[in-house]
Image (cartoon, rainbow, N blue to C red):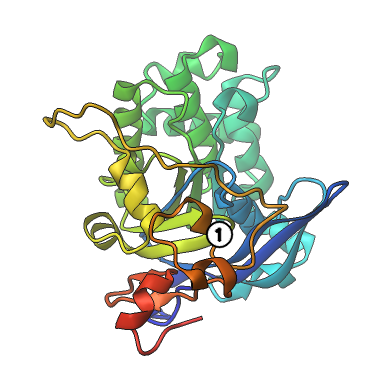
Amino acid sequence: MAGDQRDGADTLLEVRDLRTHFMTRRGLVRAVNGVSFELKKGETLGLVGESGSGKTITCLSILKLLPRGGQIVGGEILFDGQDLVKSTESEMEGLRGKRVGMILQNSMAAMDPVFSIGTQVAEPLVAHEGLRWKQAITRSVDLLRMVKITDPQIRIRSYPHELSGGMRQRASSAASLGLHPDLLICDEPTTALDVTTQRQYLDLLKDLQISTGMAIIFITHDISIVGALCDKLAVFYGGLVVEYGPKDQVLNNPSHPYTEALLQALPTLGEKTERLRMIKGEPPHAGNLPVACPFHPRCDQAMDICKEGDAPPGFYLGNDHQARCWLLEKDNEQYHR
């Protein structure tokens, strides 16, 4: 859906009509069903939407680290001009960690419980930069200090279970940032953190981005936490990006009923509300997606074309803001597929 307003010199990542499917015993699962977006150098893009909407599989497709049975069946993933879909495993091994890092949701699962924090931060430095072990350990202490872990000389000898959830997440970040990646993918890294630690962690990511110039993809199901961090938002639903654009445009002028519903489900500080609005029904299963608009069974504004026609294209709303909704057709003589 994105891509018509791009500036090639500044574009780091461009995903075009990405389709990632899984063949299961129950049939074909279209986990990612035509996703498009772009990310410029130094930008932060938030991927928001309910669980199962395709956010994580999209990012695992970028790294070509799909679970068993997953396959990219269409589209392009252009990273600094290189189509990763066509890249060999050897080329991807040189890219992962060094140029594209990833922070996983569960820091305990992301870190090996039998190795010390120092070992896990130092190993990528040895593997990718050829440092001697002593040099890598020294750098690891600096990295732990950079992510604001107190007493890094002591913590480097600790094991994951000896750290709090917030400290483990910071240590995981240090391991991902050690090679100064151009792109950092964060897969719901604040889910297990309390509100105060969550804010500290988001501030840390922003500070690190400013100091390193890296781009960030931040995956979350909570649209309320992306306002201070992200430059752009991509709203996922049913394996598609149903709305995409600058953060302020999407949050202040939502143009897809699903985005509106997500925002209306948020509590507003200072306003007395008897009951938060709920989105009726459930998200569609990726193994049984409708041909028409995937949101129509839950949409109060659904028309006949939403239920019986093709999936809506991406209607361009100006300033790189686009949305996939037939309600926008009357105001758009031209649209981008």
Instruction: Residue 298 in the image: state x and y as whole percent.
Output: 48, 50
Residue projecting furthest to the top: 162
Instruction: Residue 135 in the image: state x and y as whole percent.
Output: 56, 35
Residue projecting furthest to the front: 304
Location of residue 181 with respect to 278 vertically, above or below = below
Q: Is residue 204 left or right of residue 156?
A: left
Q: In this view, does 45 lie to the left or right of 116?
A: left
Q: What element carries label 1?
A: loop
Residue projecting furthest to the bottom: 333
Residue projecting furthest to the left: 270
Q: Can residue 299 be seen in this view?
A: yes
Instruction: Residue 273 in the image: state x and y as whole percent.
Output: 19, 29
User: Residue 177 versus residue 314: which sits nearer the camera?
Assistant: 314
User: Residue 323 versus residue 91: which sits nearer the camera?
Assistant: 323
Location of residue 229 with respect to 231 vertically, above or below = above
What residue does disc 1 label? 294
User: Residue 308 versus residue 267: which sits nearer the camera?
Assistant: 308
Q: Residue at x 49, y 62 (%)?
A: 241
Q: Residue at x 32, y 53 (%)?
A: 260
